[in-house]
Image (cartoon, rainbow, N blue to C red):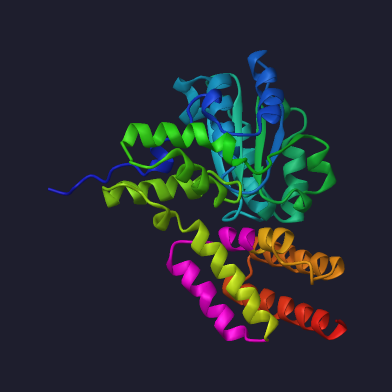
Amino acid sequence: MSKKLSKSYLEKYRPRVRKDIAGNSVVLERIFSQIDQGTLVNMILTGDSGLGKTTTAEIITKKIIGKDHYYTDCVLFNCSDKTGVENIRTEIIKIEKLRPASGIRVFFMEEAEQLSKKAQFALKKAMEYPYDKSNRFIFLSNNITKFIPAIKDRCRIYYYMAIRPVEMFPRLKYITDQEEIDISNKLLLNLAELSNGSMRYPIIQLEEFKALDRKITKNDIQLEESLESIKSIFNSLKLRKIPPARNKILQLYQNGSNFNNIIKYFHDFTMMSLGNNINYKTKAKCIIKIAETERNVKEGCNEFIQISFLLSNISLLLQKTRKSN
């Protein structure tokens, strides 16, 4: 007899009602004020992953069309798999012509920035009369700049921002209480600080902590150790020792850090701890290189190559500063 896998914490503790969504309170108030009046417009929810965009879309859709019709009148369309104009014509427009059981049909357009421009122009027609009577589109995207103006003009756009640690804490505390994970409030906040504004990272870490079945210590969080590693990396870069710096990055990965964590470490260290001997222009250029690296990875570049790119650029900038001094 095969064993049944238990739900991951990400699914088990996915918010089912508005009050359980962490952060972005102003955006949520604007969205749900419409839903409470029975109104659903075409919208674009944009921002980094792990901020609650998909969760928001699911909750408002169930509220508008009802749970009984959710699986018949809610159409999930993954734009990373179906990027072309023919997908729009043969799938979306074909479905739009059918009468929804609840009176309204909602299309979830996940990773919508992946749609080609031709596909977006075809989709524009699908959003117009007579299809607009009973069909609505919710675009979920990490990059609003990829949308053509014709799509953006037909939607209300909501920008999701990074969730602050203090906003994450109540939800994380709820999970630790439910799962009886032995972790202090201070360490729980430290875990949230490592998340780079996304709820996914700390929830995944809590699931790992549960498996340890013991009291969680600061060594498990590794915040101080990670910051010391970043300091050591910058010292290596000042001496043009890029391979040792890259090895320390790999150690951070092995200890459980991800790309978002590492980018945040670099940003915070550059802003707060790089030292008075580094001038403002060099700090600014370092921040630009950090931002470029993050953008490149989000657009699909290999993160390890981009990390090497970042290390090389910061090393060059630090060398120029030393020579000028």
Residue nearer the viewer, 319 or 15: 319
Q: Nearer the viewer, residue 290 or 184?
A: 184
Q: Is residue 108 above or below residue 78?
A: above
Q: Residue furthest left?
A: 1
Residue 221 x, y percent position in the rendering: 44, 54
Which residue, as the protein is rendered here, is positioned at the far top?
37
**Residue at x 46% of width, y 30% of height:** 71
Whether 96 is among the magenta residues is no
- Please state if 123 lies on the left or on the right of 22 as rendered: right
Measured as percent of width and height from the top left, residue 22 is found at 57, 33
Q: Is residue 212 left or right of residue 29?
A: left
Q: Quadrant of residue 302?
A: bottom right
Percent across and percent down for residue 43 are 71, 34
Left-right relation of 177 to 312: left
Main secondary structure of the magenta stretch: helix
**Region in magenta:** 240-265
* One can see residue 14 in this view: no
Determine the image quadrant of residue 164. Answer: top right
Can you give x and y, in whole percent of width and height, for residue 92 in the image?
Answer: 62, 41
Quadrant location of the C terminus? Answer: bottom right
Q: Is residue 112 left or right of residue 156?
A: left
Q: Nearer the viewer, residue 156 or 78?
A: 156
Residue at image location 39% in from the left, 46% down from the top: 206
**Which residue is painted at 52% across and 63% down in the image?**
226
The image shows residue 235, relative to residue 183, as above or below, that is below
Front-lying residue, 303 or 150: 303
Q: Is residue 248 above or below residue 150?
A: below
In the displayed structure, would residue 231 be above or below residue 110?
below
Q: Is residue 251 magenta?
A: yes
